[in-house]
Amino acid sequence: MTEMTSKHRLAILGSCVTRDLFTHIPEALEHVELGPYVSRATLLSMAGKAPRAVVVKLGDHVAKRFDDRRFVLDARKDYFRVLVKYKPETVVLDLIDERHATYLFDDGALTVTKVSKEFLVEHGLQRLPRLISPFGPDWQALQARSLQALILRLRTELPSTRFIVHAAHYALRYLAGGETRSFPDPEPSRRWNAHLDAAYDQLAEGLAAPRIGAGPDSALAGGQHLWDLTPFHYDVGYYRTLWAELAELIGSLRAARLSS
């Protein structure tokens, strides 16, 4: 591992599959200053505008719980403001949160989560948007445009930041009781993985970003994982390898900057 003499300023634009690295491998925080963690936001929502009806109802609302803070950040489209303010040296991206659907309003978009559903019902806004679900009609075309919009926005707003794509997939196997087992019906995961691979390729090319992360045939879920058993809640072994890759890249980035 390349030696790092001071903490590297890093932000996450993705999901728990990237953030959990720093819980599973706490010694990583000896080398990394972990800044903003932007999650629970789909590409369609990030590329869209803040829906006026939702923002008006938010008013001066102060979010206290984690899920509530994610919702407010998404509703107001404050992700880029937060990232620009922090000035990260590196942003790590993953696309596992594309599993969420998106509310599409006439003037904006909002990620579908438990909190956003409850908020729309509470304020009588639930009939305003149409629902865009993964692999549904229009979803792939809208997502492709949104991905390109995100790439352009990141390059414009964070011109001095380097990007790393965490190519997180749906694992096809998991650990349980010391045994490796296959998830039943792998076809939905394979479909997601094919879609994610294409999107990660576009992100890597558009942001001149290296890719890290084990492929779906190597990744293992379950085992010593932090949350419920799903194909994207990985065993700690996944994160040991991920940290080795990330630490090497961070060291290389810092060495390149020092020599320039």
Image: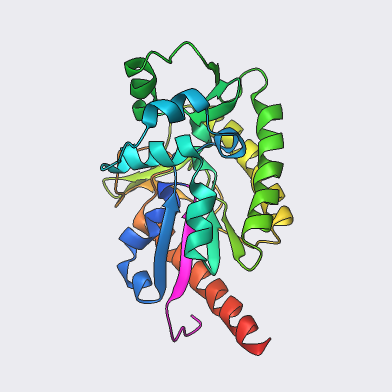
Q: Residue at x 54, y 59 (%)?
A: 84
Magenta segment includes 2: yes
- What percent of the width, then of the height, locates residue 32? 41, 71
Quick check: 91 above or below 143? below
Question: Among all residues in the image, which is located at the extreme top?
Answer: 127
- In the rendered image, is residue 179 in sight? yes
Q: Which residue is drawn at 66% across and 61% down?
A: 209
* Magenta extent: 1-14
- What percent of the width, then of the height, locates residue 232? 43, 43
Corner quadrant of residue 207 = bottom right
As rendered, which of 164 and 224 lies closer to the eye? Answer: 164
As rendered, which of 120 and 182 lies closer to the eye? Answer: 120
Quick check: 26 above or below 64? below
Corner quadrant of residue 198 = top right
As rendered, which of 98 and 218 lies closer to the eye? Answer: 98
- What percent of the width, then of the height, locates residue 162? 61, 66
* Image quadrant where one finds the C terminus: bottom right
- What percent of the width, then of the height, locates residue 208? 71, 61
Q: Which residue is drawn at 30% across and 43% down?
A: 66
Figure disc tally: 0
Quick check: 82 above or below 252? above
The image's colour scheme reads rainbow
Magenta segment includes 52: no
105 on left or right of 184: right
As rendered, which of 178 and 37 lies closer to the eye? Answer: 37
- In the rendered image, is residue 244 in sight? no
